[in-house]
C-alpha cells in the first residue's frame, strides 16, 4: 500500500486511533535506528522547579537587573 493510499484512510480514523498510529510509527522508527531513549514501561526522572532555590534566586536577580534603569 502506498502513502497516497494510506493518507485518506488515516484521515478518516478517530483521534484515538490516530494517536496509536503515531505511537507505533515513532516506536518503529526509533527501534530501526537503534535509539533506546524511551522504553515502554520504564520510568524516567523529570526535573521540577520544586525546591529549585538557586534557579529562583537567579531569576529574581535577572528581574531586579531588568528593573534598574
Image (cartoon, rainbow, N blue to C red):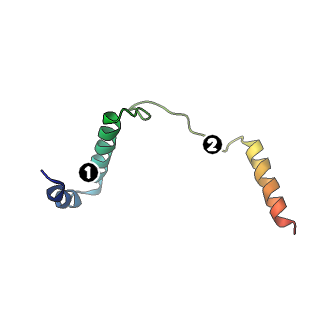
Residue furthest top in the image: 42
Viewer-closest of 56 and 14: 56
Horizontally, residue 63 falls left or right of residue 3, namely right
Horizontally, residue 69 falls left or right of residue 15, namely right
Mark 1 to mark 2 CA distance (whole Å): 32 Å
Residue furthest right in the image: 69
User: Upstream in the sequence, badge 1 or badge 2?
Assistant: 1
What residue appears at the point 33 percent right and 43 percent down from the top-left corner? 26
Viewer-closest of 30 and 67: 30
> Which residue bears the numbered disc 1?
17
* x and y, in percent, of residue 57 in the image: 80, 48
Q: Are marks 1 and 2 in contact (CB under 8 Å)?
A: no
* x and y, in percent, of residue 53 in the image: 76, 43
What residue appears at the point 76 percent right and 53 percent down from the top-left corner? 59
Please say if 49 is above or below 42: below
Horizontally, residue 19 falls left or right of residue 41, namely left
Question: SS at mark 2?
Answer: loop
> Which residue bears the numbered disc 2?
48
Residue furthest left in the image: 1
Q: Which quarter of the picture shows residue 36? A: top left
* x and y, in percent, of residue 16 in the image: 29, 52
Please say if 41 is above or below 27: above
Residue furthest bottom in the image: 69
Question: SS at mark 1?
Answer: helix
Q: Report crowding for label 2: few under 14, some 14 to 19, many 20 or more residues within 10 A (C-alpha).
A: few
Task: Quadrant for the C terminus, please.
Answer: bottom right
What residue appears at the point 62 percent right and 42 percent down from the top-left corner? 48
Q: Count every numbered label the image shows and give the total.
A: 2
User: Of the numbered discs in the image, which one, if any, rests on residue 25?
Assistant: none
* x and y, in percent, of residue 34 in the image: 36, 32
Q: Report crowding for label 1: few under 14, some 14 to 19, many 20 or more residues within 10 A (C-alpha).
A: few
Amino acid at each position: 500500500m502506498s502513502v497516497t493510499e494510506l493518507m485518506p484512510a488515516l484521515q478518516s480514523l478517530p483521534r484515538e486511533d490516530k494517536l496509536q498510529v503515531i505511537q507505533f510509527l515513532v516506536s518503529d522508527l526509533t527501534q530501526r535506528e537503534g535509539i533506546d531513549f524511551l522504553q515502554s514501561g520504564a520510568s524516567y526522572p523529570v526535573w521540577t522547579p520544586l525546591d529549585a532555590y538557586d534557579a529562583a534566586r537567579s531569576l529574581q536577580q535577572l528581574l531586579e537587573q531588568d528593573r534598574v534603569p
